């Protein structure tokens, strides 16, 4: 929300008119790799029949993806107070590339804090261009079992992660902050710079860097990153640490992961638990 409001103010100050989306899927290259689009229903105060009818679904129809890539050139809206009905996820070669969230009652689509006008009629396209897919939410209290599950399922081309789970290769994490940089800095380029600086300062590549959140205040961008690693690596850094190292799973805690493409029975069979 903060990012949306700031971008609106900046667009009015510098351009005089509201911004318009340059097609929300234009950065996806459907001409290379193996693509899958997965829709996951989300709990909503106003559930819709199509959520029950379609459930969780998958499509590998490239012609349809290219069609919506061209058609979804959407106007920005700043009236985005409703909950979401679906998360629409795009995977290339099994890797999650982009997630859009959609409200099919209030009529908008959201990506990275910006919302766009979206006609629920567009969603009807998926009725005849998708098939149901199973999913399983799996909880772990033991990091060793969690790492084993991630490693095993990661090698299956028919299984997709709802969220990134590769942080669990390492036992814990700490957080670092990057503050007061230009508001329009490219986040992907910044991620690479921070990654390279981490290697330079720690003389190690044994970590996994994730953006936790970013916010614009005035004309400055503030970003917080999660650094997943062994505990000793966190001790090397002194500046920029905003949260000390802690384990992913502490005593009495558990971690849940959502795997799409497998139900609980098949998961237990795959892991040799039956």
Image (cartoon, rainbow, N blue to C red):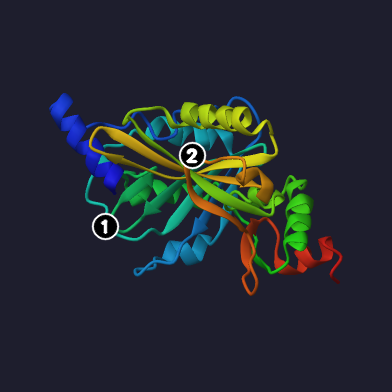
Q: Is 153 on the left-hand or right-hand side of 10?
A: right
Residue 81 numbered mark, or none? 1
Q: Secondary structure at mark 1?
A: loop
Residue 248: x, y in percent?
63, 59
Residue 249: x, y in percent?
64, 64
Is residue 64 in sight in this rendering?
A: yes
Q: Residue at x 33, y 28 (%)?
A: 184
Q: Is residue 187 above or below residue 269?
A: above
Q: Is 151 on the left-hand or right-hand side of 133?
A: right
The mark total stands at: 2
Residue 42: x, y in percent?
46, 62
- Distance between the alpha carbons at the discs numbered 1 and 2: 38 Å
Residue 73: x, y in percent?
34, 33
- What is the crowding at mark 2: few (fewer than 14 residues within 10 Å), some, or many (at least 20)? few
Task: Report the quarter where the C terminus lies.
Answer: bottom right
Q: Which residue is mark 2?
A: 239
- Nearest to the observer: residue 107 or residue 20: 20
Badge 1 or badge 2: first in the primary sequence: 1
Q: Is 254 on the left-hand or right-hand side of 97?
A: right
Is residue 95 in sight in this rendering?
A: no
Q: Residue at x 35, y 45 (%)?
A: 113
């Amino acid at each position: 929300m903060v990012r949306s409001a700031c971008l609106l103010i900046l667009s009015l100050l510098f351009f005089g008119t509201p911004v318009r989306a340059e097609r929300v899927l234009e950065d996806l290259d459907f001409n290379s790799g193996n693509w899958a689009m997965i829709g996951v229903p989300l709990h909503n105060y106003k559930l819709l029949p199509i959520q029950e009818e379609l459930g969780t679904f998958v499509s590998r129809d490239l012609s349809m993806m290219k069609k919506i890539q061209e058609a979804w050139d959407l106007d920005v809206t700043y009236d985005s107070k409703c909950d979401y009905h679906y998360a629409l996820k795009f995977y290339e070669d099994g890797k999650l590339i982009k997630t859009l969230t959609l409200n099919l009652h209030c009529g908008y689509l959201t990506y990275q804090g910006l919302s766009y006008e979206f006609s629920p009629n567009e969603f009807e396209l998926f009725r005849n261009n998708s098939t149901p897919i199973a999913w399983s939410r799996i909880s772990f209290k033991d990091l060793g079992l969690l790492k084993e599950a991630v490693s095993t399922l990661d090698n299956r081309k028919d299984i997709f992660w709802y969220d990134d789970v590769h942080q669990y290769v390492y036992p814990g994490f700490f957080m670092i902050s990057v503050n007061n940089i230009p508001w329009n800095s490219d986040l992907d380029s910044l991620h690479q710079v921070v990654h390279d600086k981490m290697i330079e300062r720690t003389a190690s590549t044994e970590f996994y860097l994730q953006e936790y959140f970013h916010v614009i205040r005035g004309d400055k961008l503030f970003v917080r990153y999660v650094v997943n690693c062994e505990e000793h690596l966190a001790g090397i850094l002194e500046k920029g640490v905003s949260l000390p190292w802690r384990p992913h799973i502490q005593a009495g805690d558990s971690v849940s992961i959502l795997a799409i493409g497998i139900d609980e029975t098949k998961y237990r069979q795959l892991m040799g638990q039956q």
